[in-house]
Amino acid sequence: MPKLRKLGVPCPLCGRELTSWDDRASRALGYLAYQVCEDCLCKEYGKTQEPVRLAAALSTTNTEIEGGPDWPSLNFSF
């Protein structure tokens, strides 16, 4: 598994420095123009890290899940 690396770019919402995971998760969940940190993704959608990470992982590996890579249509009814 590749190491997590800092990108030297601040999150536009909170100012925290983004990591390679933040970049990957943001893009997987539909943030194409800019990336946000995982904490801000969790806050925006009212989820904990576990479902956000699962959704990001599924979105990057399988676009055939409910709603495809479009984050708001993912079903989080666990």
Image (cartoon, rainbow, N blue to C red):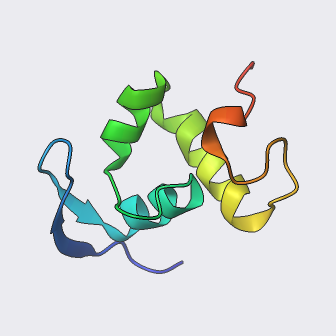
Across and down, in percent, residue 59 comes to 69, 57
Q: Is residue 16 above or below residue 20?
A: above
- Choose top left, top right, bottom left or bottom right for residue 66: top right
At x 30%, y 66%, the residue is 19
Which quadrant holds residue 33?
A: bottom left
Location of residue 73 (image quadrant): top right
State which quarter of the image contains the N terminus: bottom right
Q: Residue at x 58, y 60 (%)?
A: 28
Q: Is residue 40 above or below residue 68?
A: above
- Specify the farthest residue to the bottom: 2
Q: Position of residue 49 (x, y in %)?
A: 47, 36
x and y, in percent, of residue 44 in the image:
40, 29
Left or right: residue 36 versus residue 25 is left
Q: Where, quadrant-wise, is the C terminus in this rendering? A: top right
| Whole-percent x, y for residue 5 in the image | 29, 75
Q: Residue at x 67, y 65 (%)?
A: 60
Vertical side of 24 occupied by 55: above or below = above
Determine the residue located farthest toward the front in the rendered image.
33
Pick whichever, 25 or 73, lies toward us: 73
Question: Total of numbered circles in the picture?
Answer: 0
Closest to the observer: 49 or 36? 36
> Residue at image x 41%, y 39%?
41
